[in-house]
Amino acid sequence: MNLTGAKVRVKNITRADVSLLVKWKNDPEIGDLVRGGSINTTFEIESRRFERGLSESDIIRLMIETLAGKPIGFISLVEIDKDNKKAEIGMLIGEKDYWDNGYGTDALVTLLRHLFFEMDFNRIGLEVFEYNQRAKKAYGKIGFIIEGMQRQGLCRNNKYHDIYLMGITKEDFVKIHGVPHPKVSDYFNIK
């Protein structure tokens, strides 16, 4: 997969990206936002995860890079349910200099456009911790709706926090982002 948005490219993770995943996941601030605490992973663990991912059909791991080619984060598509045309998503921007500049939003909109219009998915869900205001705002701007809550589903620093369950359907996405323009080749059946 190699998708291009307005600010980023979303592409398959390669072996060369594994060390970045370790760096980002081991950052305490990032771990707190995406896991509720430290992740503490190693190069060996992430390498095994990468190798496993090459043969798994219900997980897709993707790298986010700027249009200039700088890797800045990743997206995981998990619990892929082809029968019901749905999946769950997780994302992080690991390079903090790129926070709050629309890179994550562009990456997710670019991927959603592909999932809804090229792969015929109907629904994408995600979880976000109540204290992660940046993520809740970004997901809401894209069109994700809070569908429910796991009350006190996360214990962080001996305090319980709610986990918001959010989702977006193809119909929701179209209302906000429209339908992609067909390529000229689509009009003439050019392959």
Image: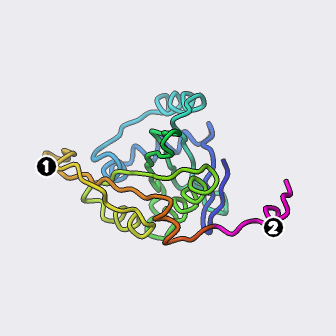
Which of the two discs, 2 and 1, labels the residue nearer the N terminus? 1
Front position in the image: 20 or 87: 87
Residue of label 2: 184
Q: Secondary structure at mark 1?
A: strand
Above-or-below relation of 6 to 22? below
Q: Comparing marks 2 and 1, which lies closer to the viewer?
A: 2
Above-or-below relation of 160 to 102? above
Residue drawn at point x = 47 percent, y = 46 percent = 86
Mark 2 crowdedness (10 Å alpha carbons): few <14, some 14-19, many ≥20: few
Residue 64 location, x and y as percent?
57, 54
Residue drawn at point x = 42 percent, y = 70 percent = 141
- For the record, the magenta segment spans 180-191
Residue of label 1: 159
Position of 162 with respect to 7 (left or right) is left
- Magenta stretch, main secondary structure, is loop
Q: CA distance from mark 2 to mark 1?
A: 55 Å
Query: Callout 1, which amino acid?
Result: Lys
Residue 51 location, x and y as percent?
57, 28
